Amino acid sequence: MTNHTTIIDLDPDDTARTEAAARFLADSVHKSIVGLVPYSSPKYAGFLRAATRPPAPMRTLLVRMAVRDSHLVGAADWRILPDRLFLNGLTVSERHRGTGVGRELVADGLRIADSLGLTELGLDVIADNSAALSLYGRMGFTLTTTTGWYELPAGAGSDSGPARATDWPSFRAHHDAYGFGDLTLRLSTGDTSKVRLVGRTLRSEQPEPAPGVRACARLIGVERITCTAAVPPPGDFSFLCESVRMLRKL
Ligand SMILES: CC(C)(COP(=O)(O)OP(=O)(O)OC[C@H]1O[C@@H](n2cnc3c(N)ncnc32)[C@H](O)[C@@H]1OP(=O)(O)O)[C@@H](O)C(=O)NCCC(=O)NCCS
């Protein structure tokens, strides 16, 4: 066994590796939020296959895989945002941890950002993940903001006002195909609010779900309602974990 690592792009026609990459990314999910993020979907490999289908210059998603002795030993999922390269997920296989694979995958991201003319990288990490915090700190990332993950009582509360689901058909189709989907609600004020459904768990990015969220939850048969926010939600909630945003300038 050598420590020589090659880093390659995911080929969507390579079914075995696409499924392996999806399993790797599912392993990157912190135990406190398993089931709440798209990586937990059993259909995530199908999403990866579709999202990596366009040619690289047209894509916003890039999966880089670390290979040693022909074996996949790590995977990183990068998102190309307008202003930065964002590390959406990173995992190294258990038996190869501590041998420099994580460092190589992050260094690869630094090179990609540079080649795209992006001057910043970002990521979110759960606050008690000391190995990941240490890796990112070593690679020059610094802590910025924190966000709490909370679970709200599923049946409690009433709808505080009307909202229209603007993209219901595409949301349902995406959820059926890949096990998760984002729904946009247009409120009576004209503002919009997005919710994400993973399986039967709904997540809103506001401390208090926007009007219409509970009506949608009933329509879809949601079992859990969660939210991510900088401040705790009003009323009853369970605290799940805290995530930290880290940034690095090139
Ligand atoms: C976090 C993770 C990706 C690190 O990958 P890795 O290949 O083991 O890391 P490396 O061997 O490249 O180590 C690079 C640096 O990370 C830090 N590090 C790695 N493992 C660590 C550990 N268990 N404890 C403390 N620091 C650790 C060290 O600072 C190390 O630098 P050093 O070698 O100069 O001491 C890996 O542990 C992993 O896959 N964990 C499970 C999934 C996960 O948590 N993903 C991150 C989600 S944000």
Image (tube, grey):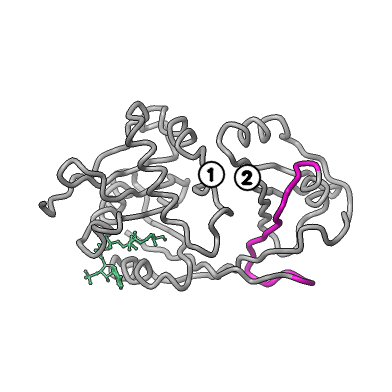
**Which quadrant holds residue 101?**
bottom left
Looking at the image, which residue sits at the far left? Answer: 2
Q: Amino acid at mark 1?
A: Ser
Q: Residue at x 52, y 70 (%)?
A: 145
Cβ–Cβ under 8 Å for marks 1 and 2: yes
Residue 50: x and y in percent read 46, 30
Q: Residue at x 69, y 48 (%)?
A: 194
Judging from the image, what secondary structure is the residue with disc 2 in? Answer: loop
Residue 13: x and y in percent read 35, 26
Q: Which residues are magenta?
A: 219-236
Q: Residue at x 41, y 63 (%)?
A: 247
Indicate whether residue 148 is drawn in magenta: no
- From the image, tell me which residue sits under label 2: 199
**Which quadrant holds residue 169?**
top right
Side of 24 relative to 204 (left or right): left
In the rendered image, which quarter contains the C terminus?
A: bottom left
Side of 52 relative to 32 (left or right): left
Disc with the residue nearer the chain's start (1 vs 2): 1
Indicate whether residue 223 is drawn in magenta: yes
Residue 11: x and y in percent read 32, 31
Image height check: is 70 above or below 143? above
Q: Amino acid at mark 2?
A: Gly
Whole-angstrom CA distance, mark 1 to mark 2, is: 7 Å
- From the image, tell me which residue sits under label 1: 41
Say which of 136 and 149 sits in front.
149
